[in-house]
């Protein structure tokens, strides 16, 4: 999916919501545990309930890897079920030397046919470029993350006076265009978005941290939206586990997603379409 097609989905749905499929067998409704593939059945019902309200789905690969071969099969079935209109993100946070990165890229872009993958930039250009070599695929580079430990390194100031995360985002723009490269910027840092947009004006930003992590959607959107949308805001636990153990859990997930989408529609109208 190219940038224009992604923005068209945002415009049509008045939404830039990404639903994170962080599916944990220990947290899904107990009645699903009797099905042949509880993880897929849970994902299927979440997708059925939310697909008209979101533009992207982001399976967190760790939740599937941990289940071995069965988990990978659940992931494959989930990807096959997601409508082609939706942008798919492999939240894998891969990052290694070039030959290894090439095979990671082949796995997620060819074997599993994701639209994008999250990548850690610590090892530099040659570890990222193999992912950028795939046509119509996206690299989502970790920029400023939403976890508490981000302060250990990402805010460290370099000799230039700039923090490390800013250096990463500035340099990475030399590796790929805004048609193939996005950045992760956590919603727990809404005050940073205004400055980030001064040096990353055109790239899409994947924004984790609303919902269960308490990020401020309005503040992030005010500074982060651009004239092509420019944001994919992710919510995982706050949507997929909204129904707890109820048999009609998907209805609660839909209600949670709809609440976010309605706020996004208002913010888009004000910032982009108004």
Image (cartoon, rainbow, N blue to C red):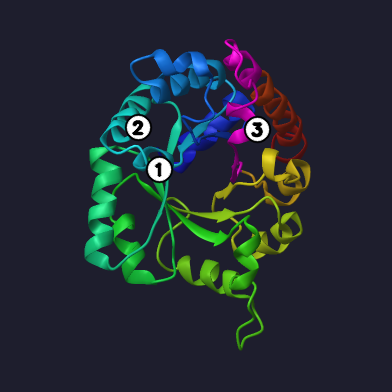
Q: Residue at x 44, y 50 (%)?
A: 179
Q: Earlier in the sequence, mark 1 or mark 3?
A: 1
> Is residue 243 magenta-colored?
yes
Residue 41, compared with residue 209, is above or below; it is above
Q: Earlier in the sequence, mark 1 or mark 2?
A: 1
Q: Nearer the viewer, residue 144 or 197?
A: 144
Q: Nearer the viewer, residue 10 or 155?
A: 155
Q: Residue 96, how many percent across, how many down?
A: 32, 65
Identify the image quadrant of the C terminus. top right
What is the number of callouts on the image?
A: 3
Q: Which residue is mark 1?
A: 61
Q: Residues within 10 Å of mark 3 (few under 14, many from 20)?
A: some
Q: Is residue 90 visible?
A: no
Do the residues bearing badges 1 and 2 touch, measured as CB atoms within 8 Å? yes
Distance, label 1 to label 2, CA atoms, is: 8 Å
Q: Which residue is mark 3?
A: 238
Q: Residues within 10 Å of mark 2 (few under 14, many from 20)?
A: many
Q: Residue 191, how many percent across, how many down?
A: 76, 59
Give the magenta part as a residue range: 228-254
In what element is the residue under mark 2?
A: helix
Distance, label 1 to label 3, CA atoms, is: 18 Å
Q: Residues within 10 Å of mark 1 (few under 14, many from 20)?
A: some
């Amino acid at each position: 999916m190219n940038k224009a097609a992604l923005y068209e989905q945002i415009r049509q749905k008045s939404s830039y919501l990404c639903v994170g499929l962080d599916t944990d067998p220990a947290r899904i409704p107990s009645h699903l545990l009797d099905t042949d593939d509880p993880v897929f059945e849970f994902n299927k019902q979440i997708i059925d309930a939310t697909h008209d309200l979101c533009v992207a789905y982001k399976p967190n690969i760790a939740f599937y890897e941990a289940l071995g071969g069965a988990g990978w099969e659940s992931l494959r079935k989930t990807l096959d079920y997601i409508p082609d209109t939706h942008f798919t993100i492999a939240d894998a946070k891969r990052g290694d030397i070039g030959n290894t990165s090439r095979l990671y890229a082949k796995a997620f872009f060819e074997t599993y046919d994701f639209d994008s993958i999250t990548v850690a930039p610590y090892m530099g250009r040659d570890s990222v470029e193999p992912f950028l070599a795939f046509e119509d695929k996206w690299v989502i580079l970790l920029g400023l993350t939403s976890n508490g430990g981000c302060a250990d390194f990402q805010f460290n100031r370099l000799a230039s006076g700039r923090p490390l995360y800013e250096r990463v985002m500035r340099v990475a723009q030399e590796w790929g265009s805004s048609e193939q490269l996005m950045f992760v910027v956590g919603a727990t840092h809404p005050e940073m978005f205004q400055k980030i947009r001064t040096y990353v004006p055109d790239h899409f930003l994947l924004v984790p941290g609303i919902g269960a992590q308490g990020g401020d959607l309005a503040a992030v959107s005010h500074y982060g939206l651009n004239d092509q949308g420019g944001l994919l805001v992710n919510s995982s636990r706050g949507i997929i586990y909204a129904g707890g153990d109820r048999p009609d859990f998907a209805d609660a997930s839909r209600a949670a997603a709809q609440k976010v989408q309605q706020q996004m529609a208002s913010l888009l109208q004000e910032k982009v379409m108004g």
